[in-house]
Image (cartoon, helix red, strand yellow):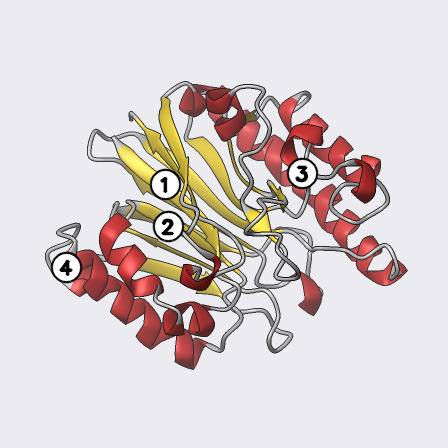
């Protein structure tokens, strides 16, 4: 059994100040995908070193150097940034979504091929999709361009899995609530980025035409939520007025091995180290 986790950090330096190390030492998932790292490499490296110490403390690796890590910094200062650490053997690393070269699209997509202790080959993708903004046509254009390019890469990953090759899981902040079950106030947000029909149609394609599985939803069933993000404004967290925008989408064979999930929501607003809660899924591979 391995645990794969995904979490938007809302800034790795801020998360470190707010106590993310305690979470790492407690949970230490075999694969941990991070979004919105938002820091230069010179500041990411020592924090990743500290995470390696947390993993060693948790007994998940013998030495801090045994924790494999990768990340891509956004070329626009203070934006995006994705990272990944794993205790599993790494076979390959790939950076960036093929076909996108603009600075605004950097720090949003990394892939790694890993092998489980039983020899199961797996591609893990860490994704941070553009948030978009309906008041800014440029930002919506960037988001749709990214989503269009994603479709091409997802088809390739699906084909690889269907041929008996590596199975795949996409982990990240997709900045789309798929259905009304995934958002506390759907009516009020129908015209807002993240819940537009055009955006939600992409998820329909991933789950339909491309045959990926929304792992958490397949395990939870058709219940309201649970959510993974709450606005910092008002009492959204306290009143659980949230959105489910953090997902793990897996190819069918891998999805069938999922045995459970957890959205690790902080006990209180003051104890959060991000405005997102980590999503952890256990796979029997």
Q: Secondary structure at mark 4?
A: helix
Q: Residue shown at 57%/56% (left/top)?
A: 96
Answer whether labels 4 and 1 touch (C-beta < 8 Å). Answer: no
- Most foreground residue, 101 or 141: 141
Q: Position of residue 283 (x, y in %)?
A: 33, 29
Tell me the crowding category of disc 2: few under 14, some 14 to 19, or many 20 or more residues within 10 angstroms, Cα based. many
Q: Secondary structure at mark 1?
A: strand
- Most foreground residue, 22 or 72: 22
Mark positioned earlier in the residue sequence (1 or 3): 1
Mark 2–mark 4 Cα distance, whole angstroms, equals 16 Å
Mark 1–mark 3 Cα distance, whole angstroms, equals 26 Å
Q: Position of residue 36 (x, y in %)?
A: 54, 62
Q: Position of residue 100 (x, y in %)?
A: 69, 56
Tell me the crowding category of disc 3: few under 14, some 14 to 19, or many 20 or more residues within 10 angstroms, Cα based. many
Numbered badge on residue 57: 4
Residue 158 position (above or below residue 221): below
Answer whether labels 1 and 2 touch (C-beta < 8 Å). Answer: yes
Q: Is residue 5 left or right of residue 182?
A: left
Tell me the crowding category of disc 4: few under 14, some 14 to 19, or many 20 or more residues within 10 angstroms, Cα based. some
- Most foreground residue, 116 or 277: 277
Numbered badge on residue 184: 3
Mark 1–mark 2 Cα distance, whole angstroms, equals 6 Å
- Quarter of the N terminus within the rendering: top left
Q: Residue beneath label 2, please?
A: 32
Mark 4–mark 1 Cα distance, whole angstroms, equals 19 Å
Q: Residue beneath label 1, please?
A: 4
Mark positioned earlier in the residue sequence (2 or 3): 2
Mark positioned earlier in the residue sequence (4 or 1): 1
Q: Disc 2 vs disc 3: which is toward the camera?
A: 3
Residue 171 visible here: yes
């Amino acid at each position: 059994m391995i645990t794969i986790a995904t979490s938007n950090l809302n800034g790795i330096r801020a998360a470190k100040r707010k106590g993310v190390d305690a979470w790492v030492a407690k949970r230490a998932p075999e694969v941990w995908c991070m979004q919105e790292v938002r820091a230069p490499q010179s500041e990411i490296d020592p924090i990743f070193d500290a995470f390696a110490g947390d993993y060693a403390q948790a007994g998940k690796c013998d030495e801090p150097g045994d924790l494999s890590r990768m990340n891509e910094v956004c070329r626009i200062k203070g934006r995006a940034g994705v990272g990944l650490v794993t205790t599993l053997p790494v076979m390959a690393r790939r950076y960036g979504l093929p076909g996108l070269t603009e600075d605004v699209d950097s720090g949003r997509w990394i892939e790694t091929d890993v092998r489980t202790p039983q020899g199961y080959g797996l591609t893990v993708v860490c994704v941070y999709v553009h948030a978009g903004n309906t008041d800014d046509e440029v930002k919506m254009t960037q988001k749709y361009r990214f989503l269009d390019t994603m479709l091409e890469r997802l088809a390739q990953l699906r084909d690889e899995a269907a041929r008996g090759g590596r199975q795949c899981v996409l982990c990240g902040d997709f900045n789309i609530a798929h259905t009304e079950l995934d958002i506390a106030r759907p009516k009020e947000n129908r015209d807002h980025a993240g819940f537009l029909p055009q955006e939600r149609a992409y998820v329909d394609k991933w789950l339909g035409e491309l045959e990926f599985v929304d792992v958490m939803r397949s395990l939870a069933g058709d219940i309201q939520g649970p959510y993974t993000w709450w606005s910092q404004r008002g009492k959204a967290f306290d009143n659980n007025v949230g959105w489910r925008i953090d997902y793990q989408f897996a190819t069918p064979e891998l999805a069938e091995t999922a045995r459970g999930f957890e959205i690790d929501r902080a006990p209180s607003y003051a104890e959060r180290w991000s405005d997102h809660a980590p999503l952890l899924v256990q796979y029997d591979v």
